[in-house]
Image (tube, grey):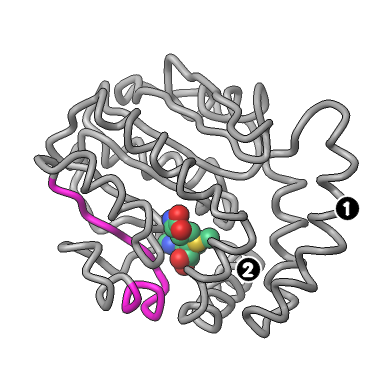
């Protein structure tokens, strides 16, 4: 990894280490409880695939993994994250039975280890989207499923109002809740620069994923993307 990317990854790791203890509360309050619906929708989509082994990448405190497990009791779910304090939260809550401290950019799993990979609110924080997707594709079975759940920016009349909330209100409320204003200023910036809609589908296709689909949730505050690993042939990968 280039030096700048390493520093960026270390900053992200440090930021999540500091907010780990308050992450779940901040998450629920800042989303107005809507994250419960987003995660439930993701879990229903995964249930339609019926995977035997699933990797929840950037699992954090394991909130999505817990929901996935309730909806998919027969699936073996492994959570991976490079932030130990976040995984400790997952351990405390008992949401995850199997967890691994791992960097998404270099996963400690053999090729084709999983039938499905989920990544919620995580890909956006990674130093290279295409590098992370390359690793996801490697650990997926050919034809395996990927689900990405992440923030997007709504279209239409309330885009302006949403941006005021994102850039002006959210960092202040979040600072009061978590004591980390910088973390939530970073959140707003990362949402603006993260590919959304067609942009994300192009990124997925370029990284060797087929049958990409996008679903806007809560008016487009969040989007859920699904795709299938198109096997291991070379792909043209657009830059981040
Ligand atoms: C916003 S939290 C999301 C946690 C969880 N997926 C959820 O839905 O609540 C982002 C997580 O991504 C993890 N993360 C960011 N970059 C990572 C990387 N390169 N490798 C592994 N985990 C990473 C962070 O440590 C953090 O726990």
Q: Where 23 sits versus 149, above or below?
A: below
Which image quadrant is residue 101 in?
Answer: bottom left
Residue 32 in the image, given as x and y percentages of width and height: 61, 55
Q: Please identify, in this view, whether the residue under mark 2 or under mark 1 is nearer the observer.
A: 1
The region drawn magenta spans: 76-89
What residue is shown at x 21% (from left), y 30% (from top)?
A: 141
Q: Where 105 sits versus 226, above or below?
A: below
How many marks can you see? 2
Task: Say whether residue 105 is visible.
Answer: no
Task: Say whether residue 200 is visible.
Answer: yes
What residue is shown at x 85% (from left), y 48% (from top)?
A: 163
Classify mark 1: helix, strand or loop.
helix
Classify mark 2: helix, strand or loop.
helix
Nearer to us in this view, 161 or 183: 161
Which residue does the numbered mark 1 point to in the structure image?
164
Residue 182 in the image, given as x and y percentages of width and height: 74, 75
Is residue 83 found inside the magenta-colored segment of the image? yes
Image quadrant holding the C terminus, namely top right
Residue 78 in the image, given as x and y percentages of width and height: 21, 54
Nearer to us in this view, 142 or 69: 69
Which residue does the numbered mark 2 point to in the structure image?
8
């Amino acid at each position: 990894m280039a030096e700048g990317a390493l520093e960026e990854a270390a900053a992200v790791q440090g930021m999540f280490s500091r907010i780990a203890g308050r992450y779940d509360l901040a998450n629920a309050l800042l989303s107005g409880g809507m994250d419960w619906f987003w995660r439930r929708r993701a879990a229903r989509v995964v249930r339609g695939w019926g995977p035997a082994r699933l990797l929840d990448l950037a699992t954090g405190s394991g909130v999505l993994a817990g929901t996935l497990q309730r909806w998919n009791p027969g699936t073996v779910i492994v959570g991976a994250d490079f932030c130990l304090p976040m995984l400790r939260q997952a351990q405390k809550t008992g949401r995850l039975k199997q967890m691994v401290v791992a960097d998404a950019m270099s996963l400690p799993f053999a090729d084709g280890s999983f039938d499905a990979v989920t990544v919620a609110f995580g890909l956006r924080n990674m130093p290279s989207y295409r590098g992370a997707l390359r690793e996801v594709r490697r650990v997926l079975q050919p034809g395996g499923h990927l689900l990405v759940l992440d923030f997007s920016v709504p279209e239409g009349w309330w885009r302006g109002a949403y941006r005021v909330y994102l850039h002006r209100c959210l960092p202040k409320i979040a600072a009061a809740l978590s004591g980390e204003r910088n973390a939530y200023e970073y959140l707003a910036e990362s949402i603006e620069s993260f590919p959304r809609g067609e942009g994300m589908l192009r990124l997925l296709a370029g990284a060797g994923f087929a049958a990409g689909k996008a679903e806007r949730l809560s008016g487009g505050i969040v989007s859920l993307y699904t795709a299938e690993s198109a096997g291991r042939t070379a792909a043209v990968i657009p830059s981040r």
